[in-house]
Amino acid sequence: MRLCSRNNYISVAATLVGAASLVGTAGCTEVDDRLGTGLIPKNQRMEIEVTSPGNGIKTYLYRADSVISSRTGSAWFGRTNDLEGVFGAQTSGVLLQFQPYGTPYEDAEGYGLDPIIDSAVILFTVTGTKGDTTQVQRFDVWEVDDSREAVKLHRDSSYYSNFDAERVRGRKLFEFSHTGKGSVYSRLFPTAAGRELLNELVTMPWVDYMNDSLFSKRYRGFVVAPAEGSPTAAALYGTNLLASGFQLHVRNHDTLDRSAIYDTLSTLFTFSDASTTYTDKGGNAKGEDETRSWASLSVNMTKFDYTGSVLGTLETQTNGFTDTLPTSPTQPLLYVQSMGGVGGMLRFTDELIEEIRSLRLKIDQTTGQTVGKDLFINQAMMGIWVDDDSVAGLDGSMARMGCYLKPQTLAPIPDYQYATELYRNQLAEQEGLTETYTLPYNGYLNRSNGYYEMDITSYVQQLAKEKPGDPQFRYLPPVVYLAPEAYGVMGAGQSVLRGFDSDKPVSIRITYAIIEG
């Protein structure tokens, strides 16, 4: 058996390798693997076959227009413009519902006597940025109105990144600025409508404070968006909603002397969209207390403008990134963006699929007839190379790449069941374990070799099945989509990758076994 360096992996477009054997180019170390072969029964011997069908995966650009962007646990807002002229401009805003997080006094006391609003501050814990953070940006905060569509917001399960907030946007409430340094801790400057809302918050019936659903019916949320005239070539800010919200500073009066200030209070309202539980007193049909759950709504919204950029030219050439038919021109470079931007499409050619399926066929030397054998695909590894593998290029590429059958809803290929990964890690965290479970799918950027490596074994196994009548046959389209990993779709990630007809095309290495009966 010949053992090769991983660097040899990049020289083959699609290499099909027999189980327990890695076959590469000249210069590899020679190892004698004949010892023990006579001990394997003939009906279990593995036939080692190697084939290189060339560029078996064609590559295109696509644009899904939108991806699911609601209740992601994060918010992205701001404006940025790629000064290198590749990805164009991006403007992002977010719709946020909010809930009281703690109360200043016990239930019956509320905010005390004659509360006075001192000030309000908006808080965002910044977890990521993209663009020029030295630019001071201004933002507007609008109310979510009480229209019929706004009332239905919480009932729908999913919203997408192209959601039009103007359909539910009401009065402008506040303005604030961010210097770009660290997390957002900015004073809210209210309009007349904003002052009205703040006064309502400290005088509303206390029962509405203590019930999440009642509170959200009364206050349906905010829309945070870049203000008109704010710098366009600035930055996007990514935030953790678990640690974000707005804070009210209130003073009240003494019960004995109403002209004297008695206390100074601070109340935090959280933007967290994580599920919480509460007790609805007398909430069921029998008038009994009922425990219910509530999750505030968040929706990330973004607009891309590719005018004057490389992607703008490609957008025109590919009819808005929709020219992805088998006969369409392929793209030697793929661009992948977060937040519903451009992505990469991989089409497995009929020739490649037939090449895989034909591995189970063999000419019987006695009869000259073609006979079938049992084919077991042990592993299929896909490699996709970064165009710029310099330190700067790798630093600018996203850390992990997802692979999907339907990118709009993040429906993954069989190998990338990211929900399982998340669930197992949540269980481990609850049990106090520190080990992290990672899907065999991998998908991470290999900085040493400058490529993303993905285990797509289950997907290729299904492509290899050729009989729709087989009870194990489940049709999968010969097309997959590259987009950021499922939990990085809302982010600042972007990557430029090499595709079909480049010097490092997308590659597949398949390890398989054939067992003769």
Image (cartoon, rainbow, N blue to C red):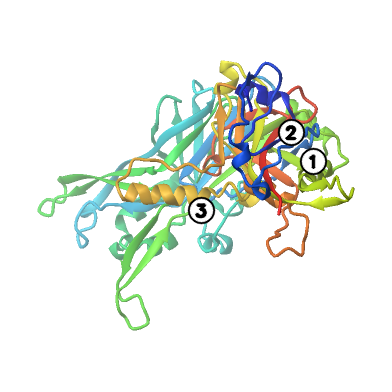
Q: Which residue is mark 1?
A: 352
Can residue 88 be seen by looking at this rendering?
Answer: no
Give the residue type at disc 1: Leu
Q: What percent of the width, then of the height, locates residue 206?
A: 28, 62
The answer to whether residue 508 is seen in the rendering is yes
Q: In the rendered structure, find residue 307 and report the number of the disc placed on it.
A: none
Q: Would you place residue 382 above or below residue 392 in this image?
A: below
What is the quadrant of residue 22 in the picture?
A: top right
As helix, strand or loop, the secondary structure at mark 3 comes to: strand
Q: Is residue 107 left or right of residue 425?
A: left
Identity of the residue drawn at 55% across and 23% down: 447
- The image quadrant where one finds the C terminus is bottom right
Q: Residues within 10 Å of mark 1 (few under 14, many from 20)?
A: some
Q: Quadrant of residue 5?
A: top right
Residue that protrudes farthest toward the left in the picture: 256
Report which residue position mark 3 lands on.
144
| Tag nearer the camera, 2 or 3 | 2
- Would you place residue 366 above or below residue 30 in this image? below
